[in-house]
Image: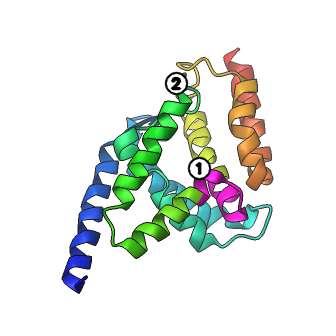
């Protein structure tokens, strides 16, 4: 492969990645003005990881965590974003994400495709300390956005405090228990006020 061929593949991947900016999420911006897109989400949680890395419960390589977070939602270009509190066919969505990962990372030169895919697979498996923390941080940002927007999507999805704890809190606590402990006070206050 020539250098020009390699560069052409890399630019094609980056152009494809731009489509993530058009993938809307259920989560609203903290000012409530509109829904965020998946590109904004990926950037924001990378910033969260960089800022909150000291609160990981195990040693992490923050640069690896940031790299995971920057690519983890690229599959949403094809598979879309499914809110954690939505009712959906999990097996079908997982299959769509796997196909999207093969297609999108496959745009890159072989060595980069393999490296990005390995990093994405590691994030999805959430077994290493880096991936556990990355998954934790991925769950933190929407909680904060919902708290900042008077519950955000929680009322629309009929989310209970128990569901939030089981679907989100458990994952955040796995990699960043101190962050979840701080958020629990705000969450309990919101549910108490909205009852």
Secondary structure at badge 1 equals: helix
- Specify the quadrant of the image occupied by residue 11: bottom left
Name the spot of residue 36 as percent of width and height, x first: 41, 41
- Magenta segment: 122-134
Q: Is residue 103 above or below residue 24?
A: below
Asked if residue 132 is among those painted magenta in the image, a careful observer would answer yes
Question: How would you rate the neighbour count of disc 2 (Cα within 10 Å): few for under 14, some for 14-19, many for 20 or more?
Answer: few
Q: Is residue 105 above or below residue 160?
A: below
Q: Is residue 5 left or right of residue 96?
A: left
- Work out how far the residue at label 2 is from the one at label 1, CA to CA, in angstroms: 20 Å
- Specify the quadrant of the image occupied by residue 134: bottom right
Q: Is residue 91 left or right of residue 161?
A: left
Name the spot of residue 127 as percent of width and height, x first: 71, 57
Tell me whether the residue at label 2 lies in contact with that at label 1, contact meaning CB atoms closer than 8 angstroms. no
**Residue on which the image places disc 1:** 138
User: What residue lies at 21% left-to-right and 77% top-to-bottom?
Assistant: 5
Asked if residue 14 is among those painted magenta in the image, a careful observer would answer no
**Residue on which the image places disc 2:** 88
Q: Evaluate whether residue 32 shows in this view.
A: yes
Most frequent secondary structure within the magenta stretch: helix
Decide which of tag 2 and tag 1 comes sooner along the chain: 2
Question: How would you rate the neighbour count of disc 1 (Cα within 10 Å): few for under 14, some for 14-19, many for 20 or more?
Answer: many
């Amino acid at each position: 492969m020539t250098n020009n061929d390699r560069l052409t593949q890399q630019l094609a991947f980056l152009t494809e990645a731009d489509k993530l900016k058009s993938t809307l999420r259920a989560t609203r911006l903290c000012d409530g003005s509109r829904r965020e897109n998946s590109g904004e989400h990926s950037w924001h949680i990378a910033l969260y990881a960089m800022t909150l890395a000291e609160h990981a419960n195990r040693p992490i390589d923050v640069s690896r965590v940031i790299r995971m977070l920057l690519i983890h939602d690229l599959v949403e270009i094809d598979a879309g974003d499914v809110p954690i509190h939505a009712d959906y066919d999990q097996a079908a969505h997982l299959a769509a994400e796997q196909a999207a990962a093969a297609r999108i990372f496959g745009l890159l030169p072989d060595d980069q495709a393999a490296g990005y895919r390995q990093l994405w697979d590691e994030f999805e498996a959430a077994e290493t300390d880096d991936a556990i923390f990355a998954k934790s941080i991925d769950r933190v940002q929407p909680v904060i956005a919902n708290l900042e927007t008077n519950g955000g999507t929680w009322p629309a999805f009929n989310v209970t405090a128990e569901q939030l704890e089981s679907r989100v809190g458990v994952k955040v606590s796995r990699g960043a228990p101190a962050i979840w402990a701080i958020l629990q006070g705000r969450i309990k206050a919101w549910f108490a006020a909205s009852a």
